[in-house]
Image: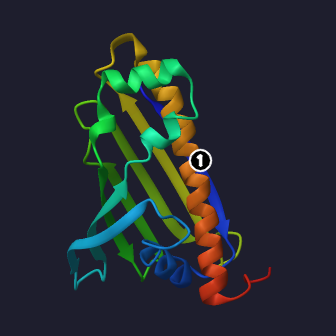
Amino acid sequence: MGVSVDVHQVYKYPFEQVVASFLRKYPNPMDKNVLSVKITEEKRDESTGVIYRKRIAICQNVVPEILRKKSTLVILCWKKVSILKVPNIQLEEESWLNPRERNMAIRSHCLTWTQYASMKEESVFRESMENPNWTEFIQRGRISVTGAGFLNCILETFASTFLRQGAQKGIRIMEMLLKEQCGAPVAE
């Protein structure tokens, strides 16, 4: 089955500044769960100017900490699939930056826990149609849980809340970084 979370945000900063901040976003003190980010591949298509990057992020497993605040049923569900034993989570992100067309497409997925769940995100940064000095961000995340039998849907509900909160936290971090690095937003 699975659950999806959609996010739409307009950053009142030019595309180039938003993308530069995004690519420098992690690790940072505002999100201590992202331990490291490593570029594993980077290449430019000379004919189109598109820059392809593949990055791996290592994140602290925050599930045990979050579960202490949740219901016993959710804790039992997670214990059933025994993901609490994993100290770190690996995420793979691929991006295609097209500076000529002022857009960047991003696909990411979780490399950890694939036997129990799949987590995928697709995002786009693009010049806003409302104002060319602003940048639109559109993201769709999807989580599907398997391996927990009839408890899959309960875990997916919990995971969708976690995904939505993570997306909102990412937007807040981007806004703070943009303000720090670029000053006040561009007015209408």
Quarter of the image with the N terminus in it: top left
Residue at 32 percent of width and 70 percent of height: 37
Q: Position of residue 51 (x, y in %)?
A: 30, 78
- Assess disc 1: are there few (<14), some (14-19) or many (≥20) residues with their C-alpha within 10 Å of its C-alpha: few
The mark tally for this picture is 1
Q: Which residue is mark 1?
A: 165
Q: Position of residue 32 (x, y in %)?
A: 47, 64
Decide if residue 167 is in sight here. yes
Image-quadrant location for residue 97: bottom left
Instruction: Looking at the picture, tell me which residue is in the foreground, 59 or 85.
Output: 85
Judging from the image, what secondary structure is the residue with disc 1 in? helix
Image-quadrant location for residue 70: top right
Q: Is residue 77 above or below residue 161?
A: above
Q: Amino acid at mark 1?
A: Gln
Give the image's coloring scheme: rainbow
Image-quadrant location for residue 80: top left
Residue sitting farthest toward the right: 188
Quarter of the image with the C terminus in it: bottom right
Instruction: Looking at the picture, tell me which residue is in the foreground, 156 or 49.
Output: 156
Residue at 52 percent of width and 72 percent of height: 29
Instruction: Looking at the picture, tell me which residue is in the foreground, 102 or 141.
Output: 141
Q: Is residue 174 above or below residue 14?
A: above
Decide if residue 133 is in sight here. no
Residue at 23 percent of width and 83 percent of height: 47
Residue at 60 percent of width and 62 percent of height: 171
